[in-house]
Amino acid sequence: MDAQAFPSGQDGEAALRRGRELLAVGDRDAAEGLFEEAFGRGAADAPWWIAQAYTEAGDVRAAAWMRRAAASLSRPGGVTVDADTLPITTGRVEDFEYLGGQVWCVAVADCDPRAAASALAAAKPSLGQATADGRVPPDEEAASAPYYANCVWIDQEALTVRLDAKDAAMPMLARVVLTVLIDELHRAGATPAQLHTPPSAYPRY
């Protein structure tokens, strides 16, 4: 990476912004170095923004950053988030790897099942309004908000949440889905708990 691309003392936020700019113009190697700097320097929500940037660029590195982003939400003694929760998928044709979609299913485990079931029920309204830009807008803004899931299904016996997001990759939507679930699990007293995406939810080709 060009030494001038990351001057001494530049903070993580600036590195993240510069990395996104470079990725947008196709300088992927320089962007990758800046993204690692941003993550290492603790830029706010860095893995989520990096996963989003790679998704918008159609770059398979979005999948690895989504894993890092999901794992970053884990808190010892609270809610543990498996790195492969709401994973972004990739595919391969001969030597070409391409960005796929995202698996929109979350399961809760290792917790008080009754409290977890209550948490999932409480989370449903917010999940139904969670948007692709990572927000839960108020009712009056919902109609004009960016894309949100067409439908949310809660299985209180299996402790699973499924979203109809057309299997599209949307890291910032994933972020708000997970943070809503974590908040409601804490509120319901359902911690410690673990979030993951079960293998049965993955697409079968």
Image (tube, helix red, strand yellow):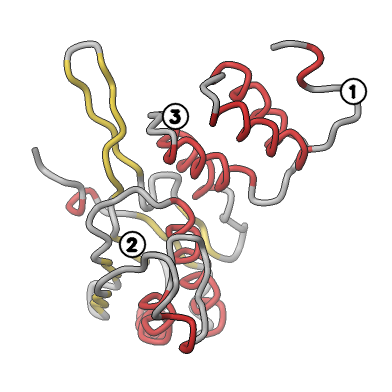
Amino acid at dot 3: Arg
Where in the figure is residue 183, as x and y percent of width and height?
A: 55, 75
> Residue 41 in the image: x percent, y percent?
77, 37
Whole-number angstrom distance, CA of label 3 to CA of label 2: 22 Å
The Cα–Cα distance between marks 3 and 1, rounded to whole angstroms, is: 26 Å
Q: Which mark is residue 106?
A: 2
User: Tag 1: residue type?
Assistant: Ser
Classify mark 2: residues with Cα within 10 Å, few (<14), some (14-19) or many (20+). Answer: many
Could you tell me if the residues under marks 3 and 2 are in contact, i.e. CB atoms within 8 Å? no
Q: CA distance from mark 2 to mark 1?
A: 41 Å
Q: Residue furthest left?
A: 205
Q: Please give the name of the residue rendered at 49% of the width and 65% of the height, measured from the top-left corner.
A: 176
The disc, 3 or 1, on the residue closer to the chain's N-terminal end is: 1
Q: How many marks?
A: 3
- Where is 115 relative to 86, above or below? below
Which residue is tagged 1? 8
Q: Position of residue 204 (x, y in %)?
A: 10, 43
- Relative to 116, 200 lies left or right: left
Of the two numbered discs 3 and 2 on the same chain, state the one appearing first in sequence. Answer: 3
Going by the numbered disc 2, the residue's amino acid type is: Val
Which quadrant would the C terminus be assigned to in this image? top left
* Viewer-closest of 107 and 11: 11
Q: Between residue 39 and residue 116, name the one nearer to us.
A: 39
Q: Which residue is mark 3?
A: 61
